[in-house]
Image (tube, rainbow, N blue to C red):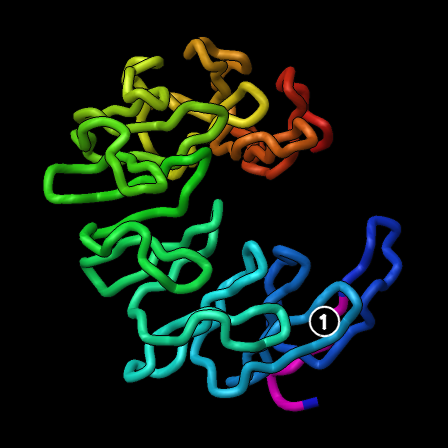
C-alpha cells in the first residue's frame, strides 16, 4: 500500500461488507448510484457492485446527478460532463459546471452563468453573476438588481429584490430582507415575516418543518405558518430527513444526536 493510502470499503445496514475494502485515500458518499473516490492524484468513481473507473488526468470530479457528473481538466480545457461509463457526454469548455437538477445544470464563465440541457445547449443564456440548481421548478439567481428566482425558460418568477436566498423546498424559500430572514412562496409573497438570523443554518422545509433561529437564540423548528413546532433549544440543527428525523447538536453537552418530529431525542 502506498504512503497515505488506506483501505476503504462499504457496508450495508447489518454491517456486512457490500464492497470489500480497496486501496483508496478518500471517498465521497454514494450519489445517483456511484461514489467519487481518490488515490494520490487519481480521481474516479465506484458503483454499488464495486466496479471502479479511473478518470486519469482529471483535476476535479463532482458527484453524479441524473446520470452525469461534472469533470474538471486543466485551465485550458475547463470543465465538461461524463456519463457513468466515463464517456464524454458534454465536451469540456466551460469555466463553471454545476450539478444536473431537473434536467438542467449551471454552466458558463466566472461572472456570466446560465443553464444548459443534457446536450450542452444553453437554454438560459449566461448572464447572471451566480446561480444555483433548480428545485421545484425554480432556480436562485443573482443579477445586477439582487437575488431572485427564474423558471426553466429563464423568465423571472418575480422581481429580484432580495439580498440573499436559499432554494425552494416544500413550496417555500428562505430569503434575506434587510438583516433578517423570512420565507416566501413561489409568487414571491412573504409567508413568514423576516425575524430569523442566518448563522450557519440551511433553512429548508422538509416534511412540514424547517430549522430556524431568532437573533441571539437557540435553534428550533418552525412549521409553514412560522410557529415553533419544536421550541428553540439546540446549538445547531439540520432539516429533517425523509425518514422524519433531524440531526441536531445539543446545547447542554454540545454532542450531536437525532430527534424525531416531536423534538424527542432519540439517543444521547
User: Where is residue 261 shown, x and y percent of the image?
Assistant: 64, 19
User: Where is residue 51 shown, x and y percent of the image?
Assistant: 74, 74
x 16%, y 44%: residue: 143
User: Where is residue 92 shown, x and y percent of the image?
Assistant: 38, 76
x 50%, y 71%: residue: 89
Assign the C terminus to one quadrant of the image: top right
x 65%, y 32%: residue: 242
Outermost residue toward the bottom in this view: 2
User: Where is residue 216 shown, x and y percent of the image?
Assistant: 32, 23
Say if residue 148 shows up in the picture. Answer: yes
Instruction: Find out whether residue 175 is within the magenta segment.
Output: no
Q: Which residues are magenta?
A: 2-9
Outermost residue toward the left in this view: 144
Say if residue 215 shows up in the picture. Answer: no
**Crowd tier of the residue under label 1, counting other residues whose Cα lies within 10 Å: few below 14, some 14–19, many 20 or above:** some
Which picture quadrant has residue 135? Answer: top left
Q: Circle 1 is placed at which residue position?
A: 8
x 46%, y 66%: residue: 70
Query: Looking at the image, is 199 positioned above or below residue 189?
Result: below
Instruction: Find out whether residue 6 is within the magenta segment.
Output: yes
Element type at mark 1 = strand
Amino acid at each position: 500500500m502506498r504512503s497515505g493510502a488506506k483501505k476503504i470499503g462499504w457496508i450495508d445496514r447489518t454491517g456486512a461488507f457490500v464492497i470489500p475494502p480497496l486501496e483508496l485515500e478518500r471517498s465521497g458518499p454514494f450519489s445517483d448510484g456511484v461514489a467519487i473516490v481518490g488515490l494520490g492524484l487519481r480521481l474516479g468513481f465506484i458503483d454499488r457492485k464495486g466496479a471502479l473507473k479511473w478518470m486519469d488526468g482529471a483535476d476535479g470530479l463532482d458527484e453524479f446527478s441524473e446520470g452525469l457528473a461534472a469533470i474538471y481538466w486543466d485551465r485550458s480545457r475547463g470543465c465538461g460532463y461524463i456519463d457513468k461509463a466515463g464517456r464524454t457526454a458534454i465536451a469540456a469548455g466551460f469555466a463553471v459546471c454545476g450539478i444536473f437538477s431537473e434536467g438542467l445544470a449551471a454552466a458558463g464563465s466566472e461572472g456570466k452563468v446560465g443553464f444548459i440541457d443534457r446536450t450542452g445547449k444553453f437554454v438560459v443564456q449566461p448572464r447572471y453573476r451566480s446561480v444555483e440548481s433548480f428545485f421545484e421548478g425554480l432556480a436562485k439567481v443573482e443579477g445586477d438588481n439582487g437575488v431572485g428566482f427564474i423558471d426553466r425558460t429563464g423568465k423571472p418568477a418575480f422581481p429580484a429584490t432580495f439580498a440573499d436566498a436559499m432554494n425552494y423546498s416544500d413550496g417555500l424559500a428562505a430569503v434575506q430582507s434587510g438583516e433578517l430572514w423570512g420565507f416566501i412562496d413561489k409568487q414571491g409573497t412573504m409567508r413568514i415575516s423576516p425575524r430569523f438570523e442566518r448563522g450557519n443554518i440551511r433553512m429548508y422545509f422538509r416534511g412540514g418543518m424547517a430549522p430556524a433561529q431568532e437573533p441571539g437564540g437557540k435553534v428550533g423548528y418552525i412549521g409553514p405558518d412560522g410557529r415553533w413546532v419544536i421550541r428553540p433549544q439546540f446549538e445547531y440543527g439540520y432539516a429533517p430527513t425523509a425518514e422524519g428525523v433531524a440531526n441536531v447538536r445539543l446545547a447542554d453537552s454540545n454532542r450531536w444526536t437525532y430527534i424525531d418530529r416531536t423534538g424527542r431525542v432519540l439517543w444521547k
